[in-house]
Amino acid sequence: MSAELAHGVTYWLRRLGGAVTGGVSKLGYAARFLLAVMWHSPQAFRRIHLTLREIYFAGVLSLVIVLMSGMFVGMVLSLQGYETLKRYGSDEQLGILVALALVRELGPVIAGLLFASRAGSAITAEIGLMKTTEQLAAMEMMAVDPLARVVAPRFWGGVISMPLLAALFSAFGIFGGYIVGVRLIGIDEGAFWGQMQAGVDFWPDVTNGIIKSVVFGIAVSLIAVFEGYNSRPTAEGVSTATTRTVVISSLTILALDFVMTAFMFRGGNV
Amino acid sequence: MNRAAIDLWVGIFVAMGIAAILFLALKVGNLLTVDHAPGYRLEARFDNIGGLKLRAPVKAAGVLVGRVESVRLDPKTYEAVATLRIDSQYEFTRDTIASINTSGVLGEVYIGLDAGGDPVMLRDGDRIAKTQSAVVLEKLIGQFLFDKAQDSSRGRNGNNADSAPTGASQGSGGTKK
């Protein structure tokens, strides 16, 4: 009886340990993968059109969804913010509220989430399918390094696209907030922009937003290419990898956002 | 899609992104306003700065003329020392009064400058001699309640009010009737 119990405890402890070491070794593998991508990047940049093509697929084709979402988020922020600020008779502060919320938080985070679902999943599926159909193996046979030819351009395409998409999201969100706040509700236009300029600083507000979006871009792109490159070469494996990309990058974005916000805006007399 | 079209679209995309960052910097933020204009520093000492924050506006007659650059506590006199960066196109007289004000009930705290008539102007690094500290709402309400209590107790023993001045020893700033 006690031997059976000890056996059960050992089994569960072994599974726990296996899960932890597996997670740590995967993290280390991802870090080495990132280094390998960096190492092959100069080789990829020598054929810059490959990266430009990926910027087109990851960035330009994500424009519509990002800009539309930005407009709507800004418009909703404006409506909701107005309803709340009106209670305190300070509805002219709406410009600050919309701009700070977008520039500091919503711009990088929502653009990052959209980017992970729109572009990250596509990158994973593409690389995963290339692996499944043995295109990557064929490249290696021809002495073409798939890291330089396939992975690095996609990684850099995502890293370059993400901050631009986040900035466009914030800009269109503020525009949407302006349309609802000034044109629809009728807040004074001068107060809207004036309060915004008085309350939002390029440093630290805008720059911190840009730093966040760069970090999200690196994280999402790395997760997307890593999951694609290491997917099981089956139809099911590709679908699992695509799902994992969206889930892991969304959680990573939110967790990183919390950590960075805690460091950037930790209150106090700043 | 051929390479020229992709290059064009990527170019448009990157230009739009840079335009958005510039928009955030210039129209939404205040990268090119008073902050980076050449200015000079003045120092003002206050007993209490209330809710004054770094980069709070400095206004004269309601016009933004500078910002609060730093706030620190003088370890000897226990006064708050605020360093103000004033736009160099504005000059203030030596007898200028600096006061800490609040715009509206929930509004931001700012430093108001009221110029006097002295012919000598303040220079870089000078100290504003006359200051008026922030009005701390809690102290004001406490004072008000204290006065009220004093009044009502005076009204209750109205007959012997003259012989026994109630609470007069505590009323450091109480209004006398």
Image: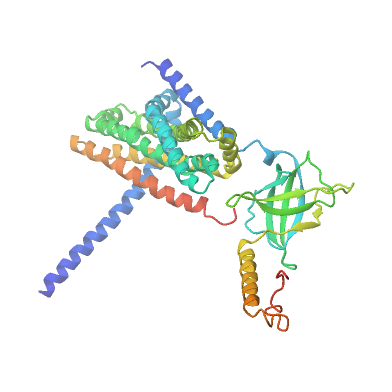
Outermost residue toward the right in this view: B119
* Residue A156 is at least partly visible in this image: no
Outermost residue toward the left in this view: A1
Where residue A263 sits in the image (x, y, percent)? Answer: 50, 53
Q: Quadrant of the N terminus of chain A?
A: bottom left
Image quadrant assignment for residue B51: bottom right
Which is more toward the observer, B163 or A75? Answer: B163
Image quadrant assignment for residue B177: bottom right
Which is more toward the observer, B45 or A92? Answer: A92
Where residue A170 sits in the image (x, y, percent)? Answer: 47, 35
* Residue A68 is at least partly visible in this image: yes
- Residue at 36% of width from left, 36% of height from top? A114
Image quadrant assignment for residue A67: top left
Where residue B91 sits in the image (x, y, percent)? Answer: 81, 43
Please state if B14 lies on the left or on the right of B63 as rendered: left
In the depicted structure, whether residue A261 falls above or below residue B165: above
- Residue at 37% of width from left, 42% of height from top? A33
In the depicted structure, whether residue B175 falls above or below residue B161: above
Please state if B169 lies on the left or on the right of B6 as rendered: right
Q: How many marks?
A: 0
- Residue at 45% of width from left, 28% of height from top? A45
The way the protein has been coloured in the rendering is rainbow
Outermost residue toward the front in this view: B159
Where residue B52 sits in the image (x, y, percent)? Answer: 64, 55
- Residue at 57% of width from left, 45% of height from top? A204
